Every structure is written in C-alpha cells, then in structure tokens.
Image (cartoon, helix red, strand yellow):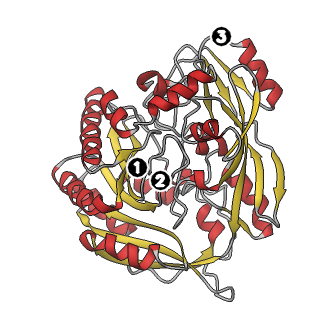
Amino acid sequence: MKNVSQLDSVGVERAFSIHNVDELRDALRRSEGSIAIGGGRYSMGGQTAIRCGSHLDIRPLNSVLNFDPENRRIRVQAGARWRDLQSLIDPFGLSIRTMQSYANFTVGGSISVNCHGRYVGHGAIAESIESMTLCLANGEIISTSREQNRDLFAAAIGGYGAVGAIVDATLRLDTNEKISRHLQALPVNEYFDWVTSEVLRSNSAVMHNADLMPGAWRTARATTWHRAPTEATLTTPDRLQDQNSKYLAQRTAISTLAGSRMADRVRAKLLDESNAPPKTIWRNYEASLDVASLEPFSRERHSFVLEEFFVPERNARQFANALATYLETSASGTLNVSIRHAPMDELALMSWAREAVFSFVLYIRVGTSKAALEAQARWVRALIDLALLNDGTYYLPYRLHATTNQFVRAYPNALQLKRIRNEVSAERFLNTLWEKYL
C-alpha cells in the first residue's frame, strides 16, 4: 500500500472497505493480527498501514448523521471529506471551523493527526470537536467527549488510531463570510512582533500565514485574510473551488521549476504576490483548495514531502533565523516554508501545542534514490534537534525520520497514551508509526 509520497510502501495482508459499523465490527472479528486504519492516505510514513496486517479503509463510512444549521453543529462519519461537507453546508452560510488548507482529507484522518490550518485563534482541530464515537478492538462502540470517557477522547485526537477506530464526530461550524486579502512583506526578525500585534490581536483576521522563499529565507511574505463587509464586491464570485480543475499551470511549475537555485528564484518570483491586486472572496472558496494543485506529473525520480516543526512563541524568532541559516547553507530541496500560529491545545493527549506556538511547514523536493532519502533523513533529524533545542516539537504524519529519543523528548505523554492503549486492549490497532515508537 502506497501513500501520497509513494516513498514508503507497506505490504498488507488484507484490506477491508468499511461502509457501516456492522462491517467495522465484522472486519475486527474476521481479521487476525494487527490492524491499521486509513482515510485519504495523505500521511507520508506508513501511518495508515502495518506490514502483513489488515487495513481498514474508512472512506466509504462517510454519511452525515445530523446537521443543525441553527446551532452550527454537524455530526458526520469518519470517512467524509471536508470538500463534501462544504458542498452541504455552504448553502446555509456555514463553513468548517478548523481544517487543513486543502479540502481532500477525511474527518477521521484529520482528527487522528490533530490537524490545523491557517485559522486565526483556532489552532488544532481538537478545539472544534464536541464529541466522538469510537470502536474499540473488541467491537464495543463507545461515546466520548470532554465530559464522557475524556481520557479516550483526548487520546484519540492526535492518536493515529492507537486506541480505537473513529466512527463519527460532532463538530462545531463557523459562519461563511466574505474575506479580503492583505499582503505584507517584512524581515523575519520583525515578523513575529508584527503578527502578534496586527493579526493575533485583530478582531477581523480570519486566516493567516507567511511564506519564506529560496533566495529570501529572511523575508516573510505575510498573507492575512480579513473579514470583509457584507456589501464588499467579490473579485471571484464562485463559492467553492472547481473540483474538476486540472491545475496544469501549478503542476507544471512544481514539476519543472524546482531543483536548482536558478529555478527556485524563478519560482519564487512567479509566486510572489506582493504587488497582486486586491482580492475578496468567500471563506469557503479559500478553504476548498485541492491537493491536486500540488501534485507533480511524476514522482518517479523526485517526490515532494512535508516536514513541520512547532516552536513556542518565545523562541520563534530564534528558530526562524537558525532555520534560515540552515536553508541558506544546505541543499535541502526546500521549496518554501509556511509559518502559521496556533494557541495552546490543552485537550489532546499528544498535543503538539503545549503552549502557544508558531508552526514552520517545509515543502520539500527529494530524490527517490537511497542516497537522497538517507541524506534527507539526516537533515530532518538535525531540524528536529533544532526544534527541541528551542523547546519545540515536530509533527507526526510525515516520514519516520526521528530517533526514538527524539520522539520521547518531543512527545512526553506517549507513555500515558501507551497506558490508555493497554487499558482498552488496543494492541491490535497498530501502524508503522506506533510500531517504531510505542
């Protein structure tokens, strides 16, 4: 079984396509040995599979169980994609409260990795989850929330299937609204104070991120989407992105304008929107981006992967400068770094934001040869050390480069996760992530 990067294939014994709870229980009963759970399969290190075990494909488990527009709540099964939910809720003037920047991911997978996006003040998806239904290894269906079975609730969010299979979740929704883009370029040394005063304390900021580009790793190109007046004129009238777009221009740029310093400079210039005209769109239009726009024409010789590091606000400038020095002096293949902010996440057991943090998302072109992959693993471990040195951590959905020592330092609650896992006899739920670190 291959994931999106096509770098880490895992040979599984059997795959089950899950359409309902009865099929889920039946798969648990009929299978032997270890079981991994997968949705969109966008994780990059085998987090959705275990070698010689069984795989539960929850994508067909995708029904909406309850939709309450008035109270802005939706209960949905784990296999539903954000894009499908957007089509349902947009006519009611509603938007997903917290999700990734792209809409292809499943709800269950997003909760399992405790995803985040660019939403100002929201941070991890944990904040928007009201309750979840889990299926334990013995087939028992159990309700969880902040008030009911809280330990299991907290362990399942960002737990990568360690304690059970997510069946459904009840999520808070937000209002869909018009948003206007504001662009600002400034030295990275000034960025963190600026974003705190001008964005995080703003009453109108809805989404924000900043990009660092090759050749200008110390310049932050900030993009903030502010709430626009209801009477504002839309520059794009569409309410959602076209799901049938081929993204030929973007895919050509990714496939051809990468891999050399000259190409990186050309790409950075093409993507520089500092002089772009004003833009006012619907929030749902910006939130319904498609990962197809990032997919190269071929991954045979080179693939594209992500790495992400979370650093406390107090150390973000120091980390950003050290990261810039590293990128200026090494051939890492990094095409850009996206910076976001997330408040403290006190709910998820395996929280990556144990205090307010800035996240640094690296988009990387890597060769598929053994030597290239080994080189990438070495420099990723160096950046994990840099994050740990700054009291930060790293994100778990990507390739499994971290040493066991790095994992334990980054996620000290892993022992508690293992305890809860043992309490509910969840040892059968296993994937390559937990095989390595638990």
Q: Amino acid at mark 3?
A: Glu
Q: 51 or 66, which lies in front? A: 66
Q: Which residue position holds label 3?
A: 32
Q: Amino acid at mark 2?
A: Arg
At horizontal 24% and vertical 54% (from top left) the residue drawn is 323
Q: Which residue position holds label 2?
A: 251
Determine if residue 10 is in view.
Answer: yes
Give the vertical position of 69 relative to 414 (above or below): below
Query: Picture coordinates of residue 59 (x, y %)?
Result: 70, 37
Mark in the foreground, 2 or 3: 3
> Under tag 1, what secondary structure?
helix
Q: Amino acid at mark 1?
A: Ser
> Under tag 3, what secondary structure?
loop
Position of 35 with respect to 388 (left or right) is right
Badge 1 density bin: few <14, some 14–19, many ≥20, Cα 10 Å: many
Q: How far is disc 1 from disc 2 in space, using C-alphas? A: 6 Å
Q: 22 or 211, which lies in front? A: 22
Q: Which mark is residue 255?
A: 1
Quarter-of-image position of residue 410: top left
